[in-house]
Image (cartoon, coloured by chain):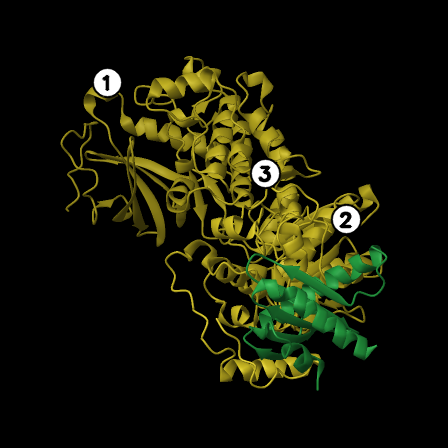
């Protein structure tokens, strides 16, 4: 199963997009505007990747961002970015745990 | 109308309509149509039936009471004699004066063209180069008049006639005065036109060459700005301003004018005659300097196609030249919704921004290298229209001015029919027509080279061959090749070098061609990001262009900067109206490449994004763009939602 499929099956993830750090839209699943989400997540991931290094976090693996009603979670894997749209936002914690579990399997 | 009966004695014209003489024959002249009216009479276009040439006939308005027993023909003859003294190509020549019955008339050179007053009425303010060129020519005419002992006394836009080849002629010496002090026709005339009248004349003092210079300065201000220097609801207000108010600074209306332009006006319109240019010759020198500044530096409002530097202030900035250059403000919709502080992808002053995108940067290095090699007399920058060549040429001209003389012309710009050679000769102050024009220009350039120990740089932008505007180009280039008097940098379209070779014998010294390519996809992306960075504060929420949006806008613009500017701005307007910050392939697909939406977005029928995107047609184009960029295809079945 692909990374995108794994993340999109997590309960609370209403849609997911596979892109790259340039924001190129590569694949989508569920209820998302793939091109918009890939572009935005590519921008965020490429911006924060440097911040992760600056903060001494090492290679950034996961980024979560939550607003009042919805949240997004990003997984950085090599030059690829997988972005999940989380709704409602309160499901974010569970989604993060599920992603970390998948990550452990990858590692 | 039949000609009036001849009469031996002067008679008045009360009750006679001077404008109804079409068909009348006065002397050898058949009046054909009215071409002008003034307080001194009506001017007709007439045919000289003896010499078969068009002639202007001014029929005098006069009456016996005003004449007070004088013969009105004598007034006209006085004007004719004064003008005959001058005998200058920039002064409308008078062929003669006569009376036939009730009609007194003067026969003059007919100038096919318009007065500067008519041009102002039609177009408003003139382009600074055009206004300054008119000033230069009018000053030349005044110089000839003053040297002949004639004061014009009524210099104003209406008395500057611009012929079909852009030659400006000074007309209407009807109020002229011999400097010896004999006022010709004093019973008939009064002081000059209020908007342009010198303070000492308002005070009742005598007119002089200095008052003509003041009037010409006031006329120049009007040509530059579209308004007289001093205006008001009544004559008293205008008079008061001429007597006491400081000369206005035209940079209030045209912030980008060079300081030399404002300085010229300050001096020409000084309240005290002794503080003005001592002669029209001095005024010409100043005017030529302004013209050279304008031509080398680019006029305000000139189009530009590169982003400004990111670090400059948003509202205004000072240039090395001194004046504060206004930065174009963003359209309201982009300011309010996307936080733009300056207009993105817009025309700004082409000289100041240090930023040049590739491929302009590389081309500029090649041009500089070619110009630095003394073996190169001619360098040709070739580029498709709208590719940024004008920006590059202007930057090169402005920077070269630091160590050598630069004459720069945009050959495309309308210049009242004046050819390239005439305009260059005007800048140099040498004869503008005939075979001696090229020779005179080359001699002048060679002298400049000798004095400055560097060849002058002649920059000619927008050259098309063959084209009437480039009359004189071939002999000039050939002369430069032969004499090495100057280096010539020519900008034009692809194929220009071959076109030049049709008319010029290069003899083993072909021009160096620097082709300026259009932007590739990566350069488009860099260019777009540079503009976004330069036009918005660093803390503003980001605006994101998707890679597909950049691919598509690069494809639609074909890498041509003018088209890219329009498309990218319209994409931003479309996004702002939809309150979006992420620009996608749809924005790039839907943006107009014809209409500028920034001003019309409230009323224009802006496209709406379809429910399924991309459409089949768009998907094919996007797929082709992705293939060309080495990207995987757009994911199958991954349509977006609105």
Judged left or right of residue B443, residue B314 is: left
Q: How many other residues sit within 10 Å of disc 2, few (<14), some (14-19) or many (≥20)?
A: many
Q: Position of residue B616 (x, y in %)?
A: 50, 84
User: Would you name the residue on which mark 1 appears?
Assistant: B68
- Tag 3, which secondary structure? loop
Determine the CA span between mark 2 and mark 3. 29 Å
Tell if the residue under mark 1 belongs to the same chain as the one under mark 2. yes
Q: Quadrant of residue A43?
A: bottom right
| Residue B446: numbered disc | 2
Where is A52 relative to B300, above or below? below
Query: Where residue A46 sits in the image (x, y, percent)?
Result: 74, 64
Determine the residue positioned at 70% across, 51% down: B395
Q: At 53% from the left edge and 48% from the top edge, which residue is drawn?
A: B335
Chain letter corresponding to the colour yellow: B
Binning the other alpha carbons within 10 Å of mark 1 as few (below 14), some (14 to 19) or many (20 upward) gives: few
Q: Is residue B382 visible?
A: no
Label 1 sits on a secondary structure element that is loop
What is the spatial separation of the Cα atoms under label 1 and label 2, in whole angstroms?
A: 60 Å
Figure colour of chain A: green
The image position of residue B459, as x and y in percent, is: 68, 54
Question: Mark 3 to mark 1: distance in Å?
Answer: 51 Å
Disc 2 is placed on an element classified as: helix
Q: Are marks 2 and 3 in contact (CB under 8 Å)?
A: no
B398 versus B505 height, above or below: above
Q: Nearer the viewer, mark 2 or mark 3?
A: 3
Q: How many tags in the picture?
A: 3
Chain-order first, disc 2 or disc 3: 3
The answer to whether residue B585 is above or below residue B631 is: above
Q: Which residue is mark 3?
A: B257
Could you say where residue B604 lies in the image, as x and y percent from the top left? 39, 61
């Amino acid at each position: 199963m692909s990374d995108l499929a794994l993340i999109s099956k997590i309960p609370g993830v209403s849609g997911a997009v596979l892109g790259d750090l340039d924001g190129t839209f590569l694949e989508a699943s569920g209820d998302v505007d793939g091109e918009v989400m890939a572009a935005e997540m590519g921008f965020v991931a490429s911006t924060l990747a440097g911040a992760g290094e600056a903060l001494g976090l090492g290679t950034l693996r996961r980024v979560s961002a939550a607003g009042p009603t919805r949240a997004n979670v990003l997984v950085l894997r090599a030059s690829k970015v997988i972005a999940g749209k989380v709704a409602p936002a309160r499901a974010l914690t569970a989604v993060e745990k599920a992603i970390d579990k998948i990550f452990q399997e990858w590692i | 109308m039949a000609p009036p009966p001849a009469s031996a004695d002067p008679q008045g014209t009360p009750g006679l309509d001077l404008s109804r003489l079409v068909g009348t024959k006065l002397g050898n002249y058949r009046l054909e149509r009215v071409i002008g009216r003034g307080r001194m009479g009506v001017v007709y276009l007439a045919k000289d039936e003896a010499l078969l040439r068009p002639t202007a006939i001014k029929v005098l308005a006069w009456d016996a009471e005003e004449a007070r027993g004088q013969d009105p023909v004598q007034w006209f003859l006085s004007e004719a004699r004064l003008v005959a003294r001058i005998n200058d190509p920039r002064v409308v020549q008078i062929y003669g004066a006569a009376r036939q019955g009730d009609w007194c008339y003067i026969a003059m050179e007919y100038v096919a063209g318009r007065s500067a007053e008519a041009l102002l009425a039609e177009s408003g303010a003139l382009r600074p180069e055009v206004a300054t060129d008119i000033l230069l020519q009018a000053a030349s005419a005044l110089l000839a008049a003053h040297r002949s002992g004639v004061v014009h006394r009524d210099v104003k836009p209406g008395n500057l006639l611009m012929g079909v080849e852009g030659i400006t002629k000074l007309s209407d010496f009807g109020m002229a005065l011999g400097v010896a002090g004999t006022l010709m026709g004093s019973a008939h005339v009064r002081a000059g036109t209020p908007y342009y009248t010198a303070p000492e004349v308002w005070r009742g003092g005598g007119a002089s060459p200095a008052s003509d210079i003041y009037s010409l300065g006031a006329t120049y201000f009007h040509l530059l700005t579209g308004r007289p220097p001093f205006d008001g609801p009544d004559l008293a207000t205008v008079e008061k301003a001429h007597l006491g108010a400081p000369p206005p600074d035209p940079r209030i209306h045209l912030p980008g004018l060079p300081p030399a332009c404002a300085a010229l006006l300050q001096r020409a319109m000084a309240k005290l005659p002794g503080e003005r240019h001592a002669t029209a010759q001095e005024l010409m020198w100043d005017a030529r300097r302004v013209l050279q500044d304008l031509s080398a530096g680019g006029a305000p409002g000139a189009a530009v196609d590169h982003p400004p530097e990111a670090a400059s202030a948003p509202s205004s900035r000072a240039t090395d030249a001194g004046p504060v250059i206004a930065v174009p403000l963003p359209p309201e919709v982009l300011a309010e919704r996307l936080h733009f502080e300056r207009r993105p992808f817009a025309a700004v002053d082409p000289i100041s921004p240090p930023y040049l995108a590739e491929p302009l940067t590389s081309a500029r290095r090649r041009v500089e290298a070619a110009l630095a090699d003394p073996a190169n007399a001619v360098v040709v920058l070739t580029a498709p229209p709208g590719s940024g060549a004008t920006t590059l040429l202007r930057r090169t001209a402005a920077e070269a001015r630091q160590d050598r003389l630069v004459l720069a012309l945009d050959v495309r710009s309308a210049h009242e029919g004046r050819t390239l050679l005439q305009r260059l000769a005007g800048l140099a102050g040498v004869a503008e027509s005939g075979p001696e024009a090229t020779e005179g220009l080359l001699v002048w350039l060679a002298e400049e080279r000798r004095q400055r120990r560097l060849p002058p740089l002649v920059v000619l932008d927008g050259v098309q061959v063959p084209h009437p505007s480039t009359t004189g180009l071939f002999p000039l280039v050939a002369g430069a090749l032969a004499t090495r008097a100057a280096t010539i940098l020519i900008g034009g379209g692809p194929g220009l070098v071959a076109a030049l070779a049709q008319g010029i014998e290069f003899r083993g010294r072909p021009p160096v061609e620097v082709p300026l390519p259009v932007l590739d996809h990566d350069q488009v992306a860099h260019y777009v990001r540079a503009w976004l960075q330069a036009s918005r504060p660093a803390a503003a929420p980001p605006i994101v262009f998707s890679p597909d949006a950049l691919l598509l806008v690069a494809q639609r613009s074909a890498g041509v900067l003018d088209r890219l500017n329009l498309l990218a701005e319209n994409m931003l307007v479309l996004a702002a109206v939809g309150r979006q910050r992420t620009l996608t392939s749809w924005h790039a697909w839907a943006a107009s490449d014809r209409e500028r939406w920034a001003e019309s977005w409230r009323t224009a029928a802006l496209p709406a994004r379809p429910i399924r995107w991309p459409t089949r047609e768009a998907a094919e184009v996007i797929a082709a763009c992705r293939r060309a960029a080495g990207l995987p295809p757009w994911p199958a079945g991954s349509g977006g939602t609105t």
